[in-house]
Image: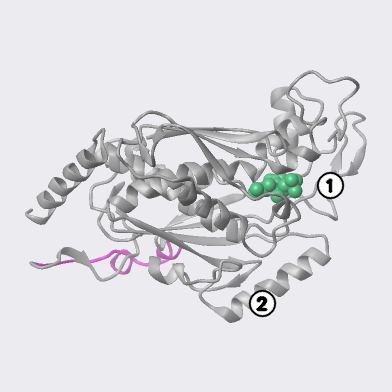
Amino acid sequence: MRFLTAGESHGPSLSVIVEGCPAGLSLTEGFINEQLARRQLGAGRGARQRIEQDRAQILSGVRRGETLGSPIAMLVTNRDHANWQETMATGETQGAADRLFTIPRPGHADLAGALKYDRRDCRDILERASARETAARVAAGSVSRRLLEEAGIHIGSSVTGVGGIQSPPGETVSACRGLDPEMPMTDPEAARRVQEAIRAAAADGDTLGGSVCVLAEGIPPGLGSHVHWDRRLDAKLGAHFFSIPSVKAVELGAGVRVSGLRGAEAQDPVHYEVRRGFYRESNWAGGVEGGISNGEVIVVTAYLKPLSTLMKPLDSVDIGTKRAAKAQKERSDVCAVPAAAVIGEAVLALCLAEALLEKVGGDSLGEVLRNLEQYRLQVERF
Ligand code: EPS
Protein backbone atom coordinates (compact mmCIF):
# COMPACT_ATOMS: atom_id res chain seq x y z
CA MET A 1 0.00 0.00 0.00
CA ARG A 2 1.40 3.42 -0.92
CA PHE A 3 0.08 6.94 -1.26
CA LEU A 4 0.77 10.34 -2.76
CA THR A 5 -0.58 13.70 -1.62
CA ALA A 6 -0.86 16.99 -3.52
CA GLY A 7 -2.09 20.46 -2.70
CA GLU A 8 -1.01 23.90 -1.48
CA SER A 9 -2.22 25.28 1.86
CA HIS A 10 -4.36 28.05 0.30
CA GLY A 11 -4.86 26.38 -3.08
CA PRO A 12 -8.24 24.98 -4.14
CA SER A 13 -7.84 21.62 -2.37
CA LEU A 14 -5.66 18.83 -1.07
CA SER A 15 -5.81 15.51 -2.85
CA VAL A 16 -4.51 12.06 -2.08
CA ILE A 17 -4.33 8.74 -3.89
CA VAL A 18 -3.98 5.53 -1.88
CA GLU A 19 -2.89 2.56 -4.00
CA GLY A 20 -2.73 -1.09 -3.00
CA CYS A 21 -5.61 -1.23 -0.53
CA PRO A 22 -7.24 -4.69 -0.69
CA ALA A 23 -10.78 -5.00 -2.04
CA GLY A 24 -13.75 -5.55 0.27
CA LEU A 25 -12.78 -3.20 3.10
CA SER A 26 -15.71 -1.14 4.32
CA LEU A 27 -14.79 2.53 4.10
CA THR A 28 -17.02 5.58 4.40
CA GLU A 29 -16.47 9.32 4.16
CA GLY A 30 -17.94 9.49 7.67
CA PHE A 31 -15.08 7.40 9.10
CA ILE A 32 -12.41 9.49 7.34
CA ASN A 33 -14.11 12.73 8.39
CA GLU A 34 -14.06 11.70 12.06
CA GLN A 35 -10.28 11.43 11.84
CA LEU A 36 -10.02 14.74 9.95
CA ALA A 37 -12.13 16.45 12.63
CA ARG A 38 -9.88 15.09 15.40
CA ARG A 39 -6.84 16.65 13.68
CA GLN A 40 -8.50 20.06 13.74
CA LEU A 41 -9.06 20.08 17.51
CA GLY A 42 -6.58 21.05 20.18
CA ALA A 43 -5.53 24.08 22.17
CA GLY A 44 -3.24 26.54 20.42
CA ARG A 45 -4.67 26.34 16.91
CA GLY A 46 -5.05 29.60 14.97
CA ALA A 47 -7.91 31.29 13.14
CA ARG A 48 -7.54 29.03 10.09
CA GLN A 49 -9.21 26.12 11.85
CA ARG A 50 -12.36 28.20 12.33
CA ILE A 51 -12.52 28.56 8.54
CA GLU A 52 -11.84 24.93 7.63
CA GLN A 53 -14.18 22.02 8.35
CA ASP A 54 -12.20 19.29 6.69
CA ARG A 55 -14.24 16.74 4.77
CA ALA A 56 -12.91 14.05 2.47
CA GLN A 57 -14.76 13.39 -0.74
CA ILE A 58 -14.06 9.90 -2.07
CA LEU A 59 -13.65 10.12 -5.86
CA SER A 60 -12.68 6.59 -6.78
CA GLY A 61 -11.71 3.13 -5.54
CA VAL A 62 -14.81 2.67 -3.37
CA ARG A 63 -18.24 1.45 -4.42
CA ARG A 64 -21.27 1.26 -2.15
CA GLY A 65 -19.10 1.66 0.95
CA GLU A 66 -16.51 -1.01 0.05
CA THR A 67 -13.05 -0.68 -1.46
CA LEU A 68 -12.54 -2.14 -4.95
CA GLY A 69 -8.78 -2.77 -4.83
CA SER A 70 -8.31 0.08 -7.31
CA PRO A 71 -6.63 3.41 -6.38
CA ILE A 72 -8.64 5.37 -3.81
CA ALA A 73 -8.64 9.08 -4.69
CA MET A 74 -9.84 11.59 -2.11
CA LEU A 75 -10.30 15.35 -2.18
CA VAL A 76 -10.25 17.70 0.82
CA THR A 77 -11.37 21.19 -0.19
CA ASN A 78 -9.59 24.22 1.31
CA ARG A 79 -12.45 26.49 2.31
CA ASP A 80 -9.95 29.30 2.89
CA HIS A 81 -9.12 29.26 -0.83
CA ALA A 82 -12.13 31.53 -1.34
CA ASN A 83 -10.03 34.26 0.35
CA TRP A 84 -6.93 33.48 -1.77
CA GLN A 85 -8.40 32.99 -5.24
CA GLU A 86 -6.28 35.67 -6.92
CA THR A 87 -3.05 34.88 -5.01
CA MET A 88 -3.32 31.12 -5.49
CA ALA A 89 -4.99 30.96 -8.90
CA THR A 90 -3.69 27.99 -10.88
CA GLY A 91 -4.39 29.71 -14.19
CA GLU A 92 -2.73 32.83 -15.62
CA THR A 93 -3.91 36.07 -13.99
CA GLN A 94 -3.74 39.76 -14.84
CA GLY A 95 -1.31 41.98 -12.90
CA ALA A 96 1.54 41.23 -10.51
CA ALA A 97 1.34 38.57 -7.81
CA ASP A 98 0.08 39.86 -4.47
CA ARG A 99 0.91 38.78 -0.91
CA LEU A 100 4.58 38.41 -1.88
CA PHE A 101 6.66 36.66 0.76
CA THR A 102 10.29 37.75 0.47
CA ILE A 103 11.66 37.68 4.03
CA PRO A 104 12.10 34.00 5.01
CA ARG A 105 11.19 32.73 8.47
CA PRO A 106 14.13 31.05 10.25
CA GLY A 107 13.16 27.41 10.79
CA HIS A 108 10.69 27.21 7.89
CA ALA A 109 11.43 25.84 4.41
CA ASP A 110 11.16 29.40 2.95
CA LEU A 111 14.84 30.16 2.24
CA ALA A 112 16.21 26.67 1.56
CA GLY A 113 13.26 25.97 -0.76
CA ALA A 114 13.56 29.33 -2.61
CA LEU A 115 17.27 28.66 -3.24
CA LYS A 116 16.65 25.09 -4.36
CA TYR A 117 13.69 25.81 -6.67
CA ASP A 118 14.97 29.27 -7.78
CA ARG A 119 11.79 31.08 -6.70
CA ARG A 120 11.79 34.82 -5.82
CA ASP A 121 8.53 34.56 -3.83
CA CYS A 122 8.83 32.23 -0.82
CA ARG A 123 5.07 31.65 -1.12
CA ASP A 124 5.93 29.23 -3.93
CA ILE A 125 7.63 27.13 -1.23
CA LEU A 126 5.70 27.77 1.96
CA GLU A 127 2.31 26.90 0.51
CA ARG A 128 3.39 23.29 0.05
CA ALA A 129 5.72 23.16 3.08
CA SER A 130 2.72 24.09 5.27
CA ALA A 131 1.51 21.44 7.69
CA ARG A 132 -1.87 21.80 6.01
CA GLU A 133 -0.62 18.82 3.95
CA THR A 134 -1.09 16.61 6.99
CA ALA A 135 -4.87 16.74 6.44
CA ALA A 136 -4.31 14.68 3.28
CA ARG A 137 -2.06 12.31 5.22
CA VAL A 138 -4.73 11.82 7.87
CA ALA A 139 -7.24 10.99 5.11
CA ALA A 140 -4.81 8.38 3.70
CA GLY A 141 -4.07 7.12 7.22
CA SER A 142 -7.80 6.55 7.78
CA VAL A 143 -7.79 3.91 5.03
CA SER A 144 -4.83 2.14 6.68
CA ARG A 145 -6.48 2.48 10.07
CA ARG A 146 -9.65 0.76 8.78
CA LEU A 147 -7.58 -2.12 7.41
CA LEU A 148 -5.64 -2.46 10.68
CA GLU A 149 -8.87 -2.48 12.70
CA GLU A 150 -10.05 -5.49 10.68
CA ALA A 151 -6.74 -7.17 11.55
CA GLY A 152 -7.28 -6.47 15.28
CA ILE A 153 -4.65 -3.71 15.41
CA HIS A 154 -5.61 -0.50 17.24
CA ILE A 155 -3.84 2.85 17.48
CA GLY A 156 -4.02 5.64 20.05
CA SER A 157 -1.98 8.62 21.21
CA SER A 158 -1.41 11.11 23.98
CA VAL A 159 0.44 14.41 24.36
CA THR A 160 3.41 13.91 26.70
CA GLY A 161 4.79 17.43 26.81
CA VAL A 162 4.18 21.02 25.71
CA GLY A 163 6.62 23.87 26.32
CA GLY A 164 8.57 21.83 28.89
CA ILE A 165 5.47 20.77 30.91
CA GLN A 166 5.46 16.96 30.97
CA SER A 167 2.69 14.39 31.40
CA PRO A 168 3.06 10.56 31.46
CA PRO A 169 2.01 8.80 28.23
CA GLY A 170 -1.33 7.01 27.97
CA GLU A 171 -0.46 3.35 28.64
CA THR A 172 -3.12 1.69 26.48
CA VAL A 173 -5.09 2.64 23.39
CA SER A 174 -8.33 2.64 25.39
CA ALA A 175 -6.78 4.92 28.04
CA CYS A 176 -5.72 7.31 25.24
CA ARG A 177 -9.25 7.35 23.81
CA GLY A 178 -10.65 8.76 27.05
CA LEU A 179 -8.40 11.86 26.99
CA ASP A 180 -9.64 15.42 26.34
CA PRO A 181 -9.01 16.16 22.63
CA GLU A 182 -8.26 19.80 23.47
CA MET A 183 -5.14 18.69 25.36
CA PRO A 184 -4.94 14.86 25.47
CA MET A 185 -2.63 14.56 28.49
CA THR A 186 -3.04 11.92 31.20
CA ASP A 187 -2.25 14.45 33.95
CA PRO A 188 -5.10 17.01 34.11
CA GLU A 189 -3.00 19.43 36.16
CA ALA A 190 -0.29 19.41 33.47
CA ALA A 191 -2.99 19.92 30.82
CA ARG A 192 -4.29 22.95 32.72
CA ARG A 193 -0.80 24.45 33.03
CA VAL A 194 -0.22 23.85 29.31
CA GLN A 195 -3.38 25.80 28.43
CA GLU A 196 -1.99 28.72 30.47
CA ALA A 197 1.43 28.41 28.83
CA ILE A 198 -0.21 28.51 25.38
CA ARG A 199 -2.13 31.65 26.29
CA ALA A 200 1.08 33.27 27.60
CA ALA A 201 3.06 32.31 24.47
CA ALA A 202 0.27 33.70 22.26
CA ALA A 203 0.30 36.98 24.20
CA ASP A 204 4.08 37.20 23.62
CA GLY A 205 3.74 36.49 19.88
CA ASP A 206 5.59 33.23 20.45
CA THR A 207 4.95 29.49 19.89
CA LEU A 208 5.37 26.18 21.76
CA GLY A 209 6.54 22.70 20.76
CA GLY A 210 6.26 19.45 22.65
CA SER A 211 6.01 15.69 22.32
CA VAL A 212 3.43 13.03 21.50
CA CYS A 213 3.42 9.30 22.23
CA VAL A 214 1.68 7.00 19.74
CA LEU A 215 0.82 3.34 20.46
CA ALA A 216 -0.25 0.36 18.34
CA GLU A 217 -1.74 -2.72 20.03
CA GLY A 218 -2.41 -6.11 18.49
CA ILE A 219 0.69 -6.22 16.26
CA PRO A 220 1.81 -9.74 15.36
CA PRO A 221 5.52 -10.47 15.72
CA GLY A 222 7.28 -10.40 12.35
CA LEU A 223 6.51 -7.06 10.67
CA GLY A 224 9.64 -5.56 9.08
CA SER A 225 12.89 -7.48 8.75
CA HIS A 226 16.46 -7.58 10.05
CA VAL A 227 17.88 -8.65 6.67
CA HIS A 228 18.33 -5.26 5.02
CA TRP A 229 18.48 -1.65 6.26
CA ASP A 230 15.50 -0.40 4.31
CA ARG A 231 13.30 -3.29 5.44
CA ARG A 232 13.78 -2.59 9.16
CA LEU A 233 10.48 -1.57 10.77
CA ASP A 234 12.23 0.93 13.07
CA ALA A 235 13.82 2.63 10.02
CA LYS A 236 10.41 2.89 8.34
CA LEU A 237 8.79 4.22 11.51
CA GLY A 238 11.54 6.83 11.80
CA ALA A 239 11.00 8.00 8.21
CA HIS A 240 7.24 8.27 8.69
CA PHE A 241 7.47 10.22 11.94
CA PHE A 242 10.30 12.49 10.76
CA SER A 243 8.14 13.45 7.78
CA ILE A 244 5.67 15.24 10.08
CA PRO A 245 6.52 18.96 9.89
CA SER A 246 8.32 20.26 13.04
CA VAL A 247 9.33 16.77 14.26
CA LYS A 248 13.01 16.96 15.24
CA ALA A 249 13.48 13.73 17.22
CA VAL A 250 11.82 10.32 17.20
CA GLU A 251 12.15 7.73 19.96
CA LEU A 252 11.15 4.07 19.88
CA GLY A 253 10.14 2.70 23.28
CA ALA A 254 12.50 4.01 25.97
CA GLY A 255 15.29 4.65 23.44
CA VAL A 256 16.62 7.84 25.03
CA ARG A 257 16.48 6.53 28.59
CA VAL A 258 18.13 3.17 27.87
CA SER A 259 21.10 4.90 26.26
CA GLY A 260 22.18 5.81 29.81
CA LEU A 261 21.64 2.37 31.37
CA ARG A 262 23.72 -0.77 31.54
CA GLY A 263 22.92 -3.52 29.04
CA ALA A 264 21.48 -5.80 31.69
CA GLU A 265 18.93 -3.16 32.71
CA ALA A 266 17.94 -2.05 29.24
CA GLN A 267 16.48 -5.22 27.63
CA ASP A 268 13.11 -6.94 27.98
CA PRO A 269 13.64 -10.51 29.35
CA VAL A 270 11.72 -13.25 27.50
CA HIS A 271 9.05 -15.41 29.24
CA TYR A 272 6.83 -18.23 27.99
CA GLU A 273 3.47 -19.66 29.05
CA VAL A 274 1.48 -22.19 27.03
CA ARG A 275 -1.59 -19.94 27.17
CA ARG A 276 0.22 -16.69 26.25
CA GLY A 277 3.16 -17.92 24.17
CA PHE A 278 6.31 -15.78 24.38
CA TYR A 279 5.87 -12.51 26.26
CA ARG A 280 7.75 -9.74 28.07
CA GLU A 281 7.05 -8.01 31.34
CA SER A 282 8.68 -4.78 30.22
CA ASN A 283 8.70 -2.98 26.87
CA TRP A 284 11.81 -0.78 26.78
CA ALA A 285 12.20 -1.78 23.12
CA GLY A 286 8.84 -0.26 22.14
CA GLY A 287 7.73 -3.38 20.28
CA VAL A 288 10.60 -3.67 17.77
CA GLU A 289 13.78 -5.73 18.10
CA GLY A 290 16.34 -6.02 15.30
CA GLY A 291 14.05 -4.18 12.91
CA ILE A 292 11.19 -6.70 13.45
CA SER A 293 8.00 -6.26 15.49
CA ASN A 294 8.21 -8.59 18.51
CA GLY A 295 4.48 -8.75 19.30
CA GLU A 296 4.56 -6.19 22.11
CA VAL A 297 2.86 -2.78 21.89
CA ILE A 298 4.61 -0.44 19.42
CA VAL A 299 5.47 2.81 21.20
CA VAL A 300 6.80 5.82 19.30
CA THR A 301 7.42 9.25 20.82
CA ALA A 302 7.90 12.20 18.47
CA TYR A 303 9.34 15.54 19.60
CA LEU A 304 8.28 18.74 17.85
CA LYS A 305 10.11 22.04 17.78
CA PRO A 306 8.04 25.18 18.43
CA LEU A 307 6.39 26.44 15.22
CA SER A 308 8.66 28.76 13.27
CA THR A 309 6.08 31.37 12.27
CA LEU A 310 6.42 34.02 15.00
CA MET A 311 4.25 37.08 15.52
CA LYS A 312 7.36 38.73 17.05
CA PRO A 313 9.65 37.68 14.22
CA LEU A 314 13.38 36.95 14.29
CA ASP A 315 16.20 38.45 12.22
CA SER A 316 16.24 37.54 8.57
CA VAL A 317 17.19 39.01 5.18
CA ASP A 318 14.93 40.16 2.33
CA ILE A 319 15.78 37.86 -0.59
CA GLY A 320 15.02 40.69 -3.08
CA THR A 321 16.96 43.62 -1.57
CA LYS A 322 19.41 41.49 0.50
CA ARG A 323 18.82 43.94 3.36
CA ALA A 324 18.44 42.83 6.97
CA ALA A 325 14.79 42.69 8.06
CA LYS A 326 12.54 40.93 10.53
CA ALA A 327 11.08 37.70 9.11
CA GLN A 328 7.72 38.08 7.44
CA LYS A 329 4.61 37.22 9.45
CA GLU A 330 1.97 34.85 8.23
CA ARG A 331 -1.12 33.81 10.19
CA SER A 332 -0.32 30.58 12.01
CA ASP A 333 -0.90 28.44 15.11
CA VAL A 334 0.63 28.96 18.56
CA CYS A 335 0.87 25.21 19.26
CA ALA A 336 0.03 22.23 17.04
CA VAL A 337 1.07 19.42 19.41
CA PRO A 338 -2.45 17.92 19.92
CA ALA A 339 -2.85 17.82 16.09
CA ALA A 340 0.55 16.13 15.84
CA ALA A 341 -0.74 13.29 18.03
CA VAL A 342 -3.55 12.59 15.53
CA ILE A 343 -1.11 12.92 12.60
CA GLY A 344 1.23 10.53 14.45
CA GLU A 345 -1.59 7.99 14.61
CA ALA A 346 -2.11 8.40 10.85
CA VAL A 347 1.55 7.89 9.95
CA LEU A 348 1.82 4.92 12.31
CA ALA A 349 -1.24 3.40 10.60
CA LEU A 350 0.25 4.06 7.14
CA CYS A 351 3.54 2.45 8.12
CA LEU A 352 2.02 -0.60 9.83
CA ALA A 353 -0.59 -1.29 7.13
CA GLU A 354 2.18 -1.31 4.53
CA ALA A 355 4.31 -3.63 6.70
CA LEU A 356 1.33 -5.92 7.38
CA LEU A 357 0.48 -6.28 3.69
CA GLU A 358 4.14 -6.91 2.90
CA LYS A 359 4.12 -9.72 5.48
CA VAL A 360 0.85 -11.48 4.68
CA GLY A 361 -0.25 -10.08 1.28
CA GLY A 362 -3.68 -10.45 -0.30
CA ASP A 363 -5.83 -8.68 -2.86
CA SER A 364 -9.06 -8.90 -0.88
CA LEU A 365 -9.70 -8.27 2.80
CA GLY A 366 -10.76 -11.92 3.14
CA GLU A 367 -7.45 -13.11 1.72
CA VAL A 368 -5.45 -10.76 3.96
CA LEU A 369 -7.31 -11.94 7.08
CA ARG A 370 -7.00 -15.64 6.12
CA ASN A 371 -3.27 -15.21 5.52
CA LEU A 372 -2.88 -13.36 8.80
CA GLU A 373 -4.83 -16.03 10.68
CA GLN A 374 -2.58 -18.76 9.21
CA TYR A 375 0.50 -16.78 10.17
CA ARG A 376 -0.80 -16.16 13.70
CA LEU A 377 -1.38 -19.95 13.99
CA GLN A 378 2.19 -20.59 12.85
CA VAL A 379 3.46 -18.28 15.60
CA GLU A 380 1.12 -19.82 18.20
CA ARG A 381 2.28 -23.36 17.34
CA PHE A 382 5.96 -22.43 17.15
C1 EPS B 1 0.56 26.46 8.78
C2 EPS B 1 0.02 27.72 9.02
C3 EPS B 1 -1.41 27.90 9.34
C4 EPS B 1 -1.96 26.62 9.91
C5 EPS B 1 -1.65 25.53 8.90
C6 EPS B 1 -0.21 25.24 8.90
O1 EPS B 1 -2.17 28.14 8.19
P1 EPS B 1 -2.66 29.61 7.78
O2 EPS B 1 -1.40 30.28 7.32
O3 EPS B 1 -3.64 29.42 6.68
O4 EPS B 1 -3.26 30.23 9.00
O5 EPS B 1 -3.32 26.76 10.18
O6 EPS B 1 -2.35 24.36 9.21
C7 EPS B 1 -3.54 24.11 8.56
C8 EPS B 1 -4.10 24.94 7.70
C9 EPS B 1 -4.10 22.81 8.92
O7 EPS B 1 -5.20 22.51 8.44
O8 EPS B 1 -3.43 22.10 9.70
C10 EPS B 1 1.96 26.32 8.37
O9 EPS B 1 2.59 27.31 8.01
O10 EPS B 1 2.51 25.20 8.42
| Circle 1 residue | 329
Q: Residue furthest front?
A: 64
Q: Secondary structure at mark 1?
A: loop
Cα distance in 3D space between marks 2 and 1: 27 Å
Which residue is found at the position 60% from the left and 81% from the top?
189
Please give left or right for residue 192 compared with residue 314 in the image: left
Q: Residue furthest bottom?
A: 189
Tell which of 89 and 30 is nearer to you.
Answer: 30
Residue stretch in magenta? 256-273
Q: Which mark is residue 5?
A: none
Please say if 335 is above or below 320.
Answer: below
The kind of residue tagged 2 is Arg
Please say if 28 is above or below 252.
Answer: above
Tell me if residue 276 is in the magenta stretch: no
- Does residue 53 appear in the picture of this structure? yes
Tell which of 318 and 269 is nearer to you.
Answer: 318
Quadrant holding the N terminus:
top left
Q: Position of residue 112 (x, y in %)?
A: 71, 33
Can you tell which quarter of the image residue 351 is in? top left
Q: Residues within 10 Å of mark 2 (few under 14, many from 20)?
A: some
Q: Position of residue 101 (x, y in %)?
A: 83, 35
| Circle 2 residue | 193
Applied colour scheme: one colour
Tell which of 247 and 27 is nearer to you.
Answer: 27
Can you tell which quarter of the image residue 129 is in? top right
Please give left or right for residue 370 compared with residue 258 in the image: left
